Image: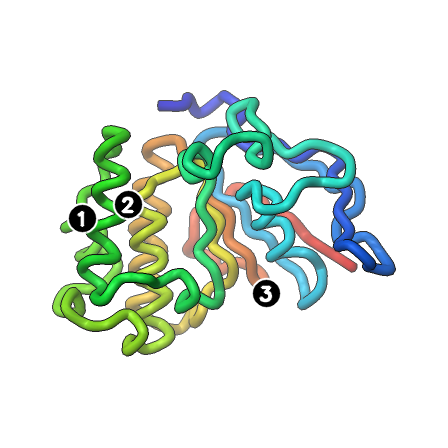
Amino acid sequence: MPTGNAEVLGCRDVVFRYPGGAKDITSNLSFKTIGGDVVWCVGDNGTGKTTLALLIAGALRPISGQVTIGGLAPSDVSIKQRTRLAFVVQQRTFLGFVKATLGKELSFAARQANLRGLSVTLEEAIRSCGLVGLEKNNPLDLSYTQAWRSALAIGFIINPAVLFVDELPNISSKLVMEAVHYVLARRCKENKVTLISAHESPPSNLPVTQVLELSP
């Protein structure tokens, strides 16, 4: 388990531009986190929140600069290793579902995590994310917030060093915020890092340790 004083995620002078793009999406972006940090990434559409998530997850590689998690560059390791480093709870959660039922989706994630000796149980994830009674549902039949809480549960089960929550779907939803509070509390206790992107400032009752303002 990482210690609270050790750097977990570091972004150093990160520049990224999509092929054919007219401008940089991120320009000399630098910040670092230690174990237990909760980073609130705030910015309008087009300021690079989702791009930052993909850079951290290793799906994109910086043009220059460096992204590291525990000293490793996510884009330089195997896909299997990347999930140990970072996982993104995406806005379009339905694109990630491939199993016939939600229970099978969550069980698959749990089997993969158990092979690595991780401590979040399937039952805990289902309960804490408000999914009890939905296990037999086809994930594609879930409501948007149910599907989002399911994706959060998968990220919680996988329990990577860095979890990036790309947009909260509804901060006025009791079930959404209860799930977020539970996941954050557990990850902070284990000195894991969590990033949450949003368009507005963080709610005062979330344990945010730093705010990262992104601008075009």
Q: Amino acid at mark 3?
A: Glu
Measure how far apart labels 3 and 1 are at the Cα level.
Answer: 32 Å
Under mark 1, the amino acid is Leu
Indicate left or right for 184 with 72 as reference.
left
Residue assigned mark 1: 122
Which of discs 3 and 1 lies nearer the camera? The answer is 1
- The residue to which callout 3 is attached is 200
Of circles 2 and 3, the one toward us is: 2
Percent x, y for residue 121? 18, 43
Mark 2 surroundings within 10 Å by alpha-carbon count, few (fewer than 14), some (14 through 19), many (20 or more): many
Q: Position of residue 210 (x, y in %)?
A: 57, 43
The residue depicted at 21 percent of the width and 64 percent of the height is: 131
Say which label, 2 or 1, has the lower sequence index: 1
Q: What's the amino acid at mark 2?
A: Ile
Residue at 23% from the left image edge and 44% from the top image edge? 110
User: Does residue 201 appear in the picture of this structure?
Assistant: yes
How many dots with numbers? 3
Q: Is residue 25 above or below residue 138?
A: above
